[in-house]
Image (tube, rainbow, N blue to C red):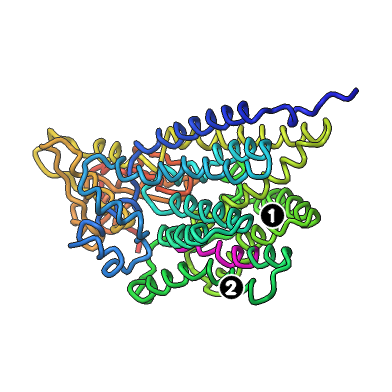
Amino acid sequence: MQSPHPAQVVSARLAALICAALVATGAVLRAIPCGNEFWLDEIWTYGLVRGLDSASGVFTALHHSNNHHLSSLAFYWLGDSPNWAIYRLPSLVAGVGSVVLAILIAWRRSRVQALIAAVLFDFCFSLVQFSSEARGYALAVFFALAAFLLLERDLERPRPWQAVGFGCCASLAFLSHLTAVFILPGALVYAGARRRRRGEPGLGVLAGCARLVAIPALAFAALYWVDLRHLLVEGGEPVVLSLLAVQTVGYTLGLPIVPQQAVPWLLLAAAPLVASLVRLQRAGDPVWIFHLLTIVVTPAAVLFTFRPEVIALRYFLVSIAFYLLAVCDGLAALFQRRTWGAVAASAFLALFVAGNVTHVRGFLRDGRGHYLAALRLMVDPTSPRSVRIGGDHDFRNGTVLGFYARYLPPRARFRYYEWKDWPPDGLDWLIYHGEQRLQQPPKERVDRYGNVYVRTYHFEKTGVSGFYWDLYRATGERRQRRP
């Protein structure tokens, strides 16, 4: 008699207990870095919201790409708190909630798939990072997953409240961040395919899709009228496609961030997705259409149509979440096979966890930078005069230093000098920042007046948010600059 496969003997109770333990682990991984230092985009939002007279100004006054509407509302309602971690609580709750929703979505297919979803969503570094950041990305993932769960339930057993719930969650998703609209084309085509499979007539299919899209369409039209048509897109560096590809795949699957490996990494990420979609298509499950559109087709179409100069991993976070859900299905099917399948699926999960834990460890250590530590190092509270600081980017460096000034001792004083105002006798410190770490940063810098500064400290960061900082201290020397 053949022994039962391990996947067949996992009871519902045991699977639920393991999932609960993984949710708790994921909550800890996301909660710890909430205490790491605020970085520019969070500080930027803090400053924008502080200037509002009412909460409605989030929609009618802040016509800026840095304004993530629901996140900005949270900033406004939480008020002016010296504890910046409090502004990250909505993202933390959404991040943990996304793990729960992924489990619930996968559980509808099998307990094994739910366990795999718990592991993938728990440890995926990109989801961990943005679940501890006071921005709208984690909220967008949460509401997109909630919308998909309600869509699945409604397609299985239609209920008016489920269609309304889908519409509300989809609207809240793109109010969290506009990239959540990626789910709408896939949801409509998927819903239509499911209804056609049940033999519904064409008018019935159209009516069913219309009831799903009505609320999101009205919400998006209203948002466009009051805000999006006035939108100012600002900030960020021009995209380097190879680096973007490596970061997106590496911080999702736990691979090293090596820009030269862009093509192999993309192929490696595509393999489990293609295998999962092909399996679903052969099984006659039209959910493959939703995943294909949400993960690949719609984002590619939007990028090709609008050709934005600034593109970053965070714009694909919703697609990453559904990529993990799609891969769950393929891994679960592989795990259900005898011996070799279970070994292969287990090896994939082990490598996934090990690689992502490496990224998470660096993130827990360095966060998005060490700006307050750097400022405290530069500003001596016993100095009889104000410390003079400059840098290579007045907005970025000056905004960050201005935010952290309130956390210095009472007698610690400094002034940030914009480049055009640098004094001829020099500054005390220069800050040179970067989104990517320089392999060989210059050992010294010379300003336009010939004042010499030597590289004294380097501050790390991990992940796609934040900046590396190199601090250059004045030597007191002057050098004739070459013409």
Query: 234 left or right of 107?
Result: left
Q: Residue 183 lies in magenta, yes or no? A: yes
Determine whether the residue tagged by mark 1 lies in a helix, strand or loop.
helix
Mark 1 residue type: Val
Residue tagged 2: 207
Q: Where is residue 219 in the image (x, y as percent from the top left)?
A: 41, 69
Q: Where is residue 214 in the image (x, y as percent from the top left)?
A: 49, 71
Q: Nearer the viewer, residue 472 or 243?
A: 243
State whether residue 301 is above or below residue 74: below
Is tag 1's residue or tag 2's residue first in the polypeptide sequence?
2
Quarter of the figure that contains the C terminus: bottom left
Which residue is found at the position 38% from the left and 52% from the top?
135
Which residue is found at the position 72% from the left and 33% from the top?
347
Q: Residue 197 lies in magenta, yes or no? A: no
Quarter of the image holding residue 351?
Answer: top right
Quarter of the figure that contains the N terminus: top right
Query: 86 left or right of 265?
Result: left
Residue tagged 1: 263
Q: Is the magenta stretch mostly helix, strand or loop?
A: helix
Which residues are drawn in magenta? Answer: 178-190
Q: Position of residue 399 (x, y in %)?
A: 27, 54
Q: Residue farthest to the right?
A: 1
